[in-house]
Amino acid sequence: METDPMTSRERLVTMARDSVAFEASGTNQLMDGISTMPVSNYFDPARWQREVDLVFKRLPLLLATTAELREPHSYKAIEVVGMPVLLTRGGDGAVRAFVNMCSHRGSMLVDPGSGVARRFTCPYHAWTYDDVGDLVGIFKQSDFGDIDMSCHGLTPLPVAERAGLIWVILSTDPVIDIDTFLCGYDELLAFHHFEDMHHFGSVQLDGPNWKVGFDGYVDFYHLPILHKNTFGTAISPDAVFHRVGPHQRITGPRQQWAKLAGVAEADWQTQDLLGGVWSVFPHGSIASFAVGDFKMFQVARLFPGANADESVSHLDFLATSEPSPEVAELVQKQIDFLISVVRDEDYATGLKIQRTVKTGAKKEFIFGRNEGGARHVHGWLDSILATSDADLPALFRNARD
Ligand code: FES
Ligand SMILES: [Fe+2]
């Protein structure tokens, strides 16, 4: 007999129960044995190109937050992995995604950035599109000649807005749908209510190979070492991983869980079950930070850059409400702090790793029993690279419990 699937709240409770048990016993979640991975995975151009083509061009990517596109007729233009994308929210409230390319002769329609616009006029010859992507005006049409304007709108891309976050597939010929890919992870992310949050700011940072960078976002082992001068040495290097398909939530087993011990599970407040780092495969990481009584989130996404040695990270900062001027100052300080940690500690280290990996001195990297986060990511990457377009949806469907 099939059992009913767990509700999302039950899933959160189950995760927390694990963490409480680890906390109570003072133990840690460890993988069986150690594993190794070829160092060339971090710089080989052929491997990198396969990741671009088979991961970043096939899977949904987290390109925006609802908070950035809250108003009708708001837009965001962003270029990632060589694809210029225009996101719009129509007057009907729906988010749409298009290739940011004019149908006439290919000018980029909108420069990267965001704003509010009902019409987009091409800077080259002033063809004009509305925010549902239809071509609505041709400059000097009588001289240009007759074309069927209904056939020359912007090219749509698959898009879905879930849990206050916006995913786009960078392909006009998708092989997987966004909900299959999410495996229900969005139902857990939804407890954060990102859709109600205020977008506080964005920053882009250059970094090393995207996997060198992303390894750091799923790794607590380095926290009290690399970040000893910023987060401090008291932070735990231990981690508990809860997987939902390729996605994973990572929590420290010693932090917020003690206060749940001895409290009936039915009385656990959902807010108390949401801590940790919410990693969104293949490239996203959502972490919360307290600023006094105020809560803010860093939504980081890493994208392959121009070649195997480069990446571009987009960091967006959300806050649970529009802060007062005094709190806003503290939030900005926290954002500046987080940017400096990522840039001056994580990526500064990663950029040096990007130089050492090409020395040829080591053929394999070692991942310990306590490094389950990166092992989960790399395992999924290998599986996806080995999976045909036709079999890709089943890979994700089978991972859904
Ligand atoms: S390229 Fe856009 S109007 Fe000509
Ligand atoms: Fe770090």
Image (spheres, rainbow, N blue to C red):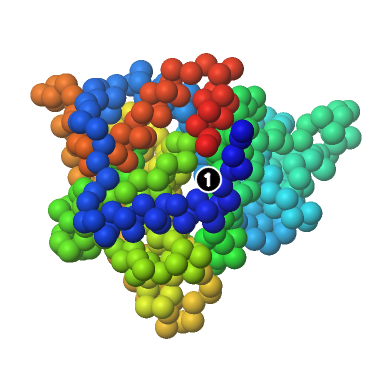
**Vertical comparison of 199 with 312: above or below:** below
Residue where numbered disc 1 is placed: 185
Q: Position of residue 145 (x, y in %)?
A: 86, 28
Q: In this view, which residue lies farthest toward the front?
A: 1
Res 83 visible: no
Q: Which of 383 and 319 lies nearest the eye of the viewer?
A: 383
Q: Which of 122 and 26 lies nearest the eye of the viewer?
A: 26
Callout 1: SS: helix
Tell me which residue sits at (40%, 49%) in the image. 249
Q: Position of residue 352 (x, y in %)?
A: 18, 39
Tell me which residue sits at (45%, 36%) in the image. 246
**Quadrant of image for the N terminus:** top right
Tell me which residue sits at (52%, 45%) in the image. 185
**Vertical comparison of 333 with 154: above or below:** below
Res 267 visible: yes
**Vertical comparison of 256 with 149: above or below:** below
Quadrant for residue 368, please give it.
top left
Quadrant for residue 393, please give it.
top right
